[in-house]
Image (cartoon, rainbow, N blue to C red):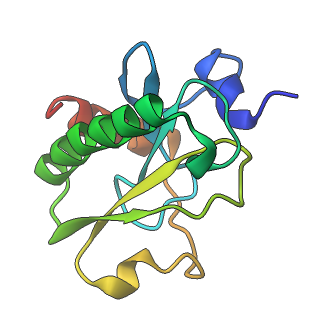
Amino acid sequence: MSSVFSKIIAGEIPSYKIAEDSRYYAFLDINPLHEGHTLVIPKQETDYLFDVEDELYSGLWLFAKKVSAALGKAIPCERIGVAVIGLEVPHAHIHLVPIHGIHDIDFSKPKLQFSKEEFEAIAKKIRMKF
């Protein structure tokens, strides 16, 4: 069965795309901790990040680095925090979260709510820096 992320890649579920190439996809998290909270995934569905084949794994982090650079230019923050939880969706993914301090990347905090128009504006702002 396809994961929700595979359905996003296939265009079956809409997303707020930040960047894409032949092997990776980055899009806004719809339950963000902070404005610009982005997910970076390999297009090849693999449940657990550390089961991703080595070359794809290395490329995923290089792709995430490029997305992080654009994110940091678009969204005011001290750093881009990185988290890999791996339990919420059975598809390897990296969270990139603009942060001002360590407590900004606490996944137990209430998530922010944005309208469709706000998500679209945030995604556009980041894409313009990519």
Image coordinates for residue 80, horizontal then vertical, percent: 25, 62
Q: Position of residue 78 (x, y in %)?
A: 14, 72
Quarter-wise, where is residue 26 in the image? Answer: top left
Height in image: 38 above or below 83?
above
What residue is at 57 percent from the left and 57 percent from the top?
A: 31
Which quadrant would the N terminus be assigned to in this image? Answer: top right
Residue 123, how many percent across, how many down?
A: 34, 37
In the rendered view, would you say 92 is above or below 95?
A: above
Between residue 95 and residue 112, name the one nearer to us: 95
Residue 52 vs residue 129, the one in the foreground: 52
Count up the numbered dots: 0
Quadrant in which residue 6 is drawn? top right
Taking the view exactly as shown, the residue that stands out farthest to the front is: 54
| Quadrant including the C terminus | top left
Residue found at x 71% / y 24%: 7
Q: Specify whether 90 is left or right of 116.
A: right
Residue 80 drawn above or below residue 58: below
Left or right: residue 45 versus residue 2 is: left
Asked which quadrant contains residue 8, the reply is top right
Q: Position of residue 119 (x, y in %)?
A: 43, 42
Residue at 71%, 57% (x, y): give it.
Answer: 88
Q: Does 103 sit left or right of 79 as displayed?
A: right
The residue located at (71%, 49%) in the rendering is 89
